[in-house]
Amino acid sequence: MSPRGVQLLLINAAAASALLAAALLWQHATRPHADAFEPPETDVCIVPATRTNAVHPYDPASGLGIHDARPIPADARCAVCGMYPSRFPRWAAQLILDDGGALFFDSPVDLFLFLAEPERFGAARDAARAAALYVSDHAGRGWVDARQAVFVTGSAARGPMRGPDLPAFADEAGAAAFVAEHGGRTVRFDGIDPPLLASLRDQNHARHTH
């Protein structure tokens, strides 16, 4: 092969390598982060819902304080509906018991339903032992004390139950930005009253099947 032919071959090989690298970079950049994963609208749960409120015990070796928020185990089931909260990291919530045990929920709505009527879920004793409540910041900023969080109600966003929910935020600014994009209004922990909760319950659990 002539020197000119070798030169063209090398140029073409370099161009192909550059295109491949660009494609791989684009694929990596556009791939959702694992923490942002949410099942598609058509996803259905084929595992029967559990009515056993499995408390996940505190692990002293975790390095976390006994009443700190902790990562959600992959096998944890929502104490209200039986879904898997770890699959919905932007919506999840957790209740920490006085002994450090934890109950997990797939969304703020289910946490509030549990607190309002724990006897419906066979867990009145657990609710009475609540030492801390946490909700996930919908903007991805980690766990937030539920009593300090700012919630949004009436938005176009749909939660894990495919119905209206209460996306939570660490501050008013985050909640206001969400309202500007998705509608709704902000509400604090104490503002989530029985009529609002009943409406959310009926719009979620009446239509959800596993």
Image (cartoon, rainbow, N blue to C red):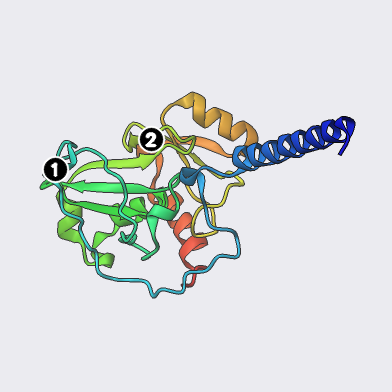
SS class, disc 1? helix
Residue in the picture at 44% in, 55% down: 87
Residue in the picture at 36% in, 66% down: 82
Q: In terms of sequence position, does the residue under pointer 2 or pointer 1 come before the other?
A: 1
- Between 152 and 11, the residue placed more toward the observer is 11
Please say if 74 is above or below 166.
below
**How many circles with numbers are drawn on the protein?**
2
Residue type marked 1: Ala
Residue type marked 2: Gly
Asked if residue 167 lies left or right of residue 8, the reply is: left
Q: Position of residue 62 (x, y in %)?
A: 18, 42
- Between 104 and 183, the residue placed more toward the observer is 104
Q: Where is mark 1, residue-wise?
A: 61
- Between 9 and 82, the residue placed more toward the observer is 9
- Graded by Cα atoms within 10 Å as few (under 14), some (14 to 19) or many (20 or more), the crowding at tag 1 reads few
Q: Can you see residue 126?
A: yes
Q: Position of residue 148 (x, y in %)?
A: 34, 31
Q: Where is mark 2, residue-wise?
A: 142
C-beta proximity under 8 Å, tags 2 and 1? no
